[in-house]
Amino acid sequence: MSYVDLMAFLGEINRPPGGKDSVRRVIQNCFINKESKVIDVGCNTGYCSFEIVHTAKCHVTGVDLNRNMIKAADGFKKKDPFGFLVDFKIADAMKLPFKSEVFDVVFSGGSTAFIEDKEKAVGEYKRILKQWGFIADINFFYRIVPPIKLISQLNKLMDINIKPWKIDYWISLYKNCGLEKYFIYTDDVKKVTKGEINKYCLAMASQKSLSEDARRELIKRLTDIMNLFNENHKYLSYGIFIFRKGPDQEQISLFGE
């Protein structure tokens, strides 16, 4: 079972970097309200979609390429009193199945980092976004260059190709697509203790009805994964990157943005 499928199997809600605080900052600084039409790209099991729905009471469309993630998100939707405000679809961020200029906010809770062609995906974000709408992306970035071995282990675990991107990488990605930098917030990533990791892994494994051998193997695998993530966090910060789509190229500014 791949890492993504394992998280879907566990129903792991997969909070974005910064958790609820990051989603709240996005809602505030994109001015999301009950009239807003929002898309959550790379929604995983729907955590950010539901947070936006519960807070702003607006309609959210969550999309993800992984079928098991969408299945898990639909399971949460059935139990949620505001489930009628959210829809989940299987879709590729590099080829989104929506007309141009239909969303007020395009949101991603960290999934852009895992997309193969990020420039193409951001082009799609921009295409489906209304004029004067916002793209909000929450992403990790490296404040310290990590060991090459650590990056290799992460890429092998998640079957991806992340690199030691710094904050300038994410800013340039959006600015090079003709988007206006609107709001950026950064903070350090929380590091946790081994005891906290063990407690988390035991709690996640206890949610499933498994044989004792399977439960033991699940706890071991989860512990290895979370220890790897925790080691990576020594080198990471995260940012909330909000860009705006305007009808014209933004004029150069000397003394302020």
Image (cartoon, helix red, strand yellow):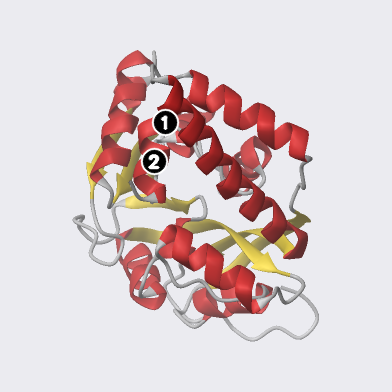
| Label 1 Cα neighbours within 10 Å, binned few <14 / some 14-19 / many ≥20 | some
82 relative to 111, above or below = above
Q: Which mark is residue 10?
A: 1
The residue under the point 58% across, 47% down is 224
Give the mark count: 2
**Badge 2 amino acid:** Leu
The residue under the point 45% across, 21% down is 212
| Label 2 Cα neighbours within 10 Å, binned few <14 / some 14-19 / many ≥20 | some
Q: Which residue is mark 2?
A: 6
79 relative to 216, above or below = above
In front of the other: 223 or 81: 223
Give the Cα separation between the discs numbered 2 and 1: 6 Å
Quick check: can you spot residue 182?
yes
Expressed as whole percent of the image width and height from the top left, the position of residue 202 reads: 59, 25
Expressed as whole percent of the image width and height from the top left, the position of residue 111 reads: 45, 56
**Badge 1 amino acid:** Leu
Relative to 132, is 79 on the left or the right?
left
In the picture as drawn, the residue positioned furthest to the front comes out as: 213
Expressed as whole percent of the image width and height from the top left, the position of residue 139 reads: 58, 59
The residue under the point 24% across, 59% down is 96
50 relative to 232, above or below = above
The residue under the point 28% across, 67% down is 94
Expressed as whole percent of the image width and height from the top left, the position of residue 161 reads: 45, 72
Q: Which mark is residue 119?
A: none
* Pointers 2 and 1 in contact (C-beta within 8 Å): yes
